Image (cartoon, rainbow, N blue to C red):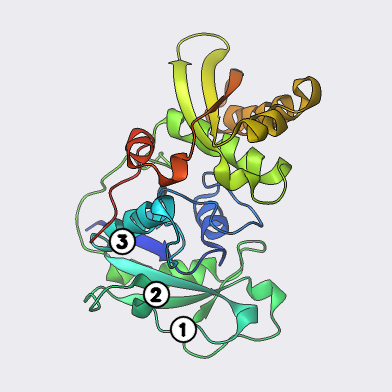
């Protein structure tokens, strides 16, 4: 009998959730940044081994929201936690013992879903606290042991996805994510947090694949920085994102990038609806 189930990668911001997802699926699906809170919407990755299909969900960090975008990021995470079969509570090994998981969610009561504590970045710590599983996305240490612990907790049943697939989201989603990843890499200070991305046009059956995207910022001064002198910053962001997309798709991509101002989009319910963020919980 086969097994197939959903597993949440959850925890505070910047604990290595996206790096672990990429290591588990063997592909750079989720964006990775040294800056916290780069994941805004859950990213789903698939790993199918023999009779088991693991459906991993990389969630936005569980934080105390300070403005509407963060409220919706947390709402997206909580919606996934309500429908998974296993929760992996990630905590960096070099920060000592992990806190109790459920208070991080802000929910009034816990769920019967099993929670496994996973200590990430174990290659950076001399030892790991008792009661958890040490893993390293960098070296791959502990990943097989993690899968062995998760496998018997998944329900028996048919695979939900093709065993050859590694993700479930459309290519449009990854176009926006890789642009944001480049913004986090190349833009300084708080500016990446003010950048959202929309796909305006996607022609998948052309050679090269044509994708036109708009980077949305909150102020006119931010627009000038994102474009850069002579357009150099925008070109650099596009080049990095295009490389990621071509690796994922396995085909050449023409990425046409533009920048527009959408004032205060992080605090606007209308803008957040337009950008696909779920409504926050009461």
Measure the alpha-carbon separation of dots 3 and 2: 11 Å
The quadrant in which the N terminus is found is bottom left
Measure the alpha-carbon separation of dots 2 and 1: 8 Å
Q: Which residue is drawn at 27% across and 61% down?
A: 84
Q: Mark 2 points at which residue?
A: 104
Q: Are marks 2 and 1 in contact (CB under 8 Å)?
A: yes
Left or right, residue 261 beside residue 65: right
| Discs 2/1, front | 2
Q: Residue at x 52, y 38 (%)?
A: 177
Q: Which residue in the rendered view is the most extreme toward the bottom?
A: 130
Element type at marker 2?
helix
Measure the alpha-carbon separation of dots 1 and 3: 18 Å
The picture places residue 74, in percent across and down from the top left corner, at 37, 59
The quadrant in which the C terminus is found is bottom left
Label count reads 3
Q: Earlier in the sequence, mark 1 or mark 3?
A: 3
- Residue 156 visible in the displayed image: yes
User: For this rendering, which residue is in front, 163 or 212?
Assistant: 212
- Mark 3 neighbour density, 10 Å: few (under 14) some (14–19) many (20 or more): many
Q: Which residue is drawn at 60% across and 62% down?
A: 137
Q: Mark 3 points at which residue?
A: 78
The picture places residue 91, in percent across and down from the top left corner, at 53, 75
- Mark 1 neighbour density, 10 Å: few (under 14) some (14–19) many (20 or more): few
Q: Mark 1 points at which residue?
A: 99
User: For this rendering, which residue is in front, 150 or 274?
Assistant: 274
The picture places residue 54, in percent across and down from the top left corner, at 36, 56
Element type at marker 3?
helix
């Amino acid at each position: 009998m086969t097994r197939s189930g959903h597993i949440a990668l959850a925890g505070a911001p910047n604990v290595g959730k996206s790096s672990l997802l990429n290591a588990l699926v063997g592909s750079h699906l989720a964006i990775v940044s040294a800056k916290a809170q780069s994941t805004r919407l859950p990213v789903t990755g698939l790993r199918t081994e023999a009779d088991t299909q693991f459906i991993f969900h990389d969630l936005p960090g569980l934080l105390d929201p300070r403005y509407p975008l963060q409220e919706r990021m947390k709402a997206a995470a909580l919606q996934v936690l309500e429908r998974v079969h296993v929760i992996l509570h990630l905590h960096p090994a070099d920060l000592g013992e992990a806190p109790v998981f459920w208070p991080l969610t802000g929910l009034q009561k816990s769920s019967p879903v099993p929670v496994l504590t996973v200590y990430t970045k174990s290659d950076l710590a001399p030892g790991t606290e008792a009661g958890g599983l040490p893993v390293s996305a960098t070296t791959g240490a502990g990943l097989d042991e993690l899968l062995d612990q998760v496998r018997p907790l998944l329900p028996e049943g048919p695979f939900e996805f093709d065993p050859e697939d590694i993700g479930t989201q459309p290519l449009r989603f990854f176009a926006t994510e890789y642009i944001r990843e480049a913004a986090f890499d190349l833009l300084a200070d708080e500016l990446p947090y003010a950048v959202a991305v929309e796909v305006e046009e996607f022609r998948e059956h052309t050679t090269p694949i044509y994708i036109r995207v708009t980077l949305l910022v909150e102020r006119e001064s931010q627009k000038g920085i994102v474009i850069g002198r002579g357009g150099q910053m925008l070109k650099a962001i596009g080049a990095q994102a295009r490389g990621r997309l071509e690796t994922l798709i396995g085909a050449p991509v023409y990425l046409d990038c533009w920048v527009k101002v959408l004032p205060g989009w992080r605090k606007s319910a209308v803008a957040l609806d337009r950008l696909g963020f779920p409504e926050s919980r009461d």
